[in-house]
Image (cartoon, helix red, strand yellow):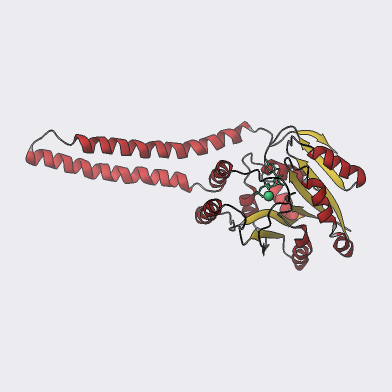
Amino acid sequence: MSLLSVIVPCYNEEENVPFFYEELMKNEAFFKEKALEVEVIYINDGSKDGTVAEVKKLHEKDERVHLVSFSRNFGKEAAMYAGLQRSKGDYVVIMDVDLQDPPSLLPEMYSYIEEGYDSVATRRVSRKGEPPIRSFFARMFYKLMDKISQAEIMDGARDYRLMSRQMVDAILAMTEYNRFTKGIFGWVGFETKWIEFENVERVKGETKWNFWKLFKYSIEGITAFSTVPLTIASFMGVLFCIIAFLAIVFVVVRKLLFGDPVSGWASQVCITLFVSGVQLFCMGIVGQYLAKTYMEVKNRPIYLVKEEL
Ligand code: UDP
Ligand code: MG
């Protein structure tokens, strides 16, 4: 028998917890056929509703259900990491509890693992049901990431992924504090099969992401997997030095040829404002990396556990 670990991060999802279990266990025949044992690890990411109680109910009914409960909300990245750490399976899959990652795709995903792939990843080909502005910025982000980082990230990639033990161990070896799992998946490499599906809207409850959170998440992704912004900052520095040099030559020559009429206050102000803007912007970029480094150096735990079943 092989063991399949299912990792399910949950944050205020009391309605979805039992629903998800039911939907997952519709694959029971498939698990039997492939001689797969299953363990389901619900990670309660500091929920304030009855999520823990719901998981406990399932745990009493079915001993394959496990619970890891955080002391507060640490975010989905931390939840996934905790789940991966606890998984014992030969294969591990990460799924959202809101059924936006359809468990019905599992047999197809597993068939590719049998073919020899190390991991099977999923991406949404449509984003229906999502605000258009959000989709637009998401697309831009994936395009940008693709250009500036080594971690291959597909447009519409989800965290829904079936992986071999070998790949899970590689991911666990990356112990960074600022975790951008989508990038980590790509960074560790291994042979990945991508399968596509139409966007599914979440069954119950609401998304935990708003525009601001997504923006911060994208900055996280960029700073974690690319230093191109730093290069841009130094490039701008060089560019402005060249411009300054040319301007100095121009001003000196003009002074020598035509004397010194006192004028040019307007242009002076424009230049000062513009250049100090660019300076602050570049300092901001450096600051972002410094902040991430600071958090990394502190070496704080990625999550804290309150209860485990
Ligand atoms: N989630 C979590 N911690 C958080 C936010 C979300 O564990 O701080 C879980 C959430 O319960 C769900 C998954 O991560 O299972 C995806 O969240 P959501 O559906 O809100 O994101 P979306 O599908 O809209 O991208
Ligand atoms: Mg969702």
* Residue at the left extreme of this rendering: 258
The residue lying at 88 percent from left, 65 percent from top is 33
In the picture shown, does residue 215 fall above or below 148?
above
Residue 86 seen by the camera: no
Horizontally, residue 8 falls left or right of residue 149, namely right
Place of residue 195 in the rendered image (x, y in percent of width and height, measured from the top left): 68, 64
Quarter of the picture for ligand 1? top right
Q: How many marks?
A: 0
Residue 208 seen by the camera: yes
Place of residue 60 in the rendered image (x, y in percent of width and height, measured from the top left): 91, 42
Place of residue 15 in the rendered image (x, y in percent of width and height, measured from the top left): 78, 45
The residue lying at 69 percent from left, 34 percent from top is 301
Q: Quadrant of the C terminus?
A: top right
The residue lying at 77 percent from left, 47 percent from top is 16
Task: Examine the image and state in which quarter residue 67 appears.
Answer: top right
Horizontally, residue 303 falls left or right of residue 277, namely right
Task: Examine the image and state in which quarter residue 165 appears.
Answer: bottom right
Place of residue 264 in the rendered image (x, y in percent of width and height, measured from the top left): 18, 36
Task: Examine the image and state in which quarter residue 32 appears.
Answer: bottom right
Q: Quadrant of the N terminus?
A: bottom right
In the picture shown, does residue 217 fall above or below 46?
below
In the picture shown, does residue 145 fall above or below 79?
below
